[in-house]
Image (cartoon, helix red, strand yellow):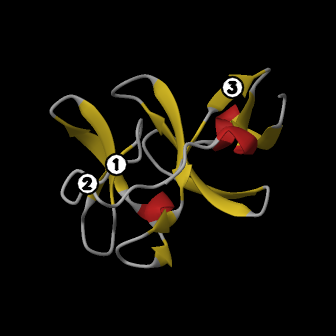
Amino acid sequence: MDNWHTICSEKDLVPNIGICALVAGKQVAVFNCTRTGSLYAVSNYDPIGKANILSRGIIGSLEDKPYVASPLYKQHFNLETGECLEEPVHKIEVYPVREQDGQIQVQAAEAVAA
């Protein structure tokens, strides 16, 4: 399935700062993490704080795993798996993301279930 959605230019994605994009009707938080050299796309919805806010979170790593810390209650969500590190019963969707010809693209149909 080739359901890639272009969300912005590579030059518009500031390193280590999230952006929010509407992809197939869902808010997606996208990050360019310089620590790992990878792009990440996760649901923008914080299931604990019950708000679309994760794109405004701070990214970093714990035990060599990349995370985003929610700006509301500071829980850490793994950017690779979506799992909440403090409360594993909570999980956010994770989306495939890529850079293609200078454009950042997210594949919405391949989300990992939350």
Q: Seen in the image, is 54 located left or right of residue 72?
A: right
Q: Quadrant of residue 58?
A: bottom left
- Mark 2 or mark 1, earlier in chain: 1
Residue named by callout 1: 83
Decide: marks 2, 1 in contact (CB < 8 A)? yes
Q: Residues within 10 Å of mark 2 (few under 14, many from 20)?
A: few
Amino acid found under the numbered disc labelled 2: Pro
Residue at 48% across, 26% down:
38
Amino acid found under the numbered disc labelled 1: Glu
Residue at 45% across, 62% down:
54
Residue 88: mark in rendering: 2
Q: Seen in the image, is 27 located left or right of residue 4?
A: left
Residue 99: mark in rendering: 3
Q: Residues within 10 Å of mark 3 (few under 14, many from 20)?
A: some
- Mark 3 or mark 1, earlier in chain: 1
Query: Alpha-carbon distance for marks 3 and 1?
Result: 24 Å
Q: Nearer the viewer, residue 57 or 90?
A: 90
